[in-house]
Amino acid sequence: MIDTTDINKSNKEYANPAMHTAEHILNQTMVRMFGCQRSRNSHIERKKSKCDYYLNEAPTQEQLAEIENTVNDIISKNLPVTISFVSKENVPDEIDLNKLPENVSETLRIVSVGDYDKCACIGEHVKNTSEIGRFKILTTDYTDGRLRLRFKVEQ
């Protein structure tokens, strides 16, 4: 089993389970829509958060609306958010391990949002997507291939 006692609960990234779970759904939506990687640079906070994605071109207003609609559609499905533990040798192929530190435990904690998203994560999450609220993209900017999405969740 992974030892989670050293997780700093005051860390802003893990301070809001609803926002953090919404980030998981946003990440998977971006992967599916644009074929990009999950966000490598994110700041998850209570009032607003941001994630960076690397894309070949800026998304259109229609695509941004589709991102927001897709995330809200997944949230509205009331999907269970579950945790499982798996050895590094048995990690499913669809789970990206590129963000893990080199000294990661041999047992990984996998967080699943229904059958929509699955990734290794140590953060706190809601138990069901019905606890998230409404996802809203606040602003975006695109510079040198980097799309920054700023968003919030409204209860």
Image (cartoon, rainbow, N blue to C red):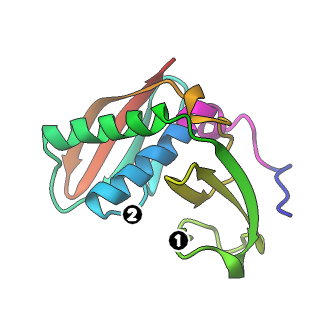
Label disc, if present, on residue 98 of the rendered structure: 1
Is residue 14 part of the magenta span, yes or no? yes
Q: Residue furthest bottom?
A: 89
Spatial distance from mark 2 to mark 1, Cα to Cα?
10 Å
In the figure, is residue 112 to the left or right of 10?
left
Q: Residue at x 69, y 78 (%)?
A: 90
Residue type indicated by callout 1 = Asn
Q: Around disc 2, counting alpha carbons within 10 Å, would you say few (fewer than 14), some (14 to 19), or many (20 or more)?
A: some
Q: Residue at x 75, y 37 (%)?
A: 9
The picture places residue 16, in percent across and down from the top left corner, at 62, 31
Q: Residue at x 19, y 57 (%)?
A: 144
Q: Around disc 1, counting alpha carbons within 10 Å, would you say few (fewer than 14), some (14 to 19), or many (20 or more)?
A: few
Q: Disc 2 designates what residue?
A: 37
The quarter of the image holding the N terminus is: bottom right
Range covered by the magenta-colored residues: 7-20
Is residue 123 part of the magenta span, yes or no? no
Residue type indicated by callout 2 = Gln
The picture places residue 59, in percent across and down from the top left corner, at 17, 48
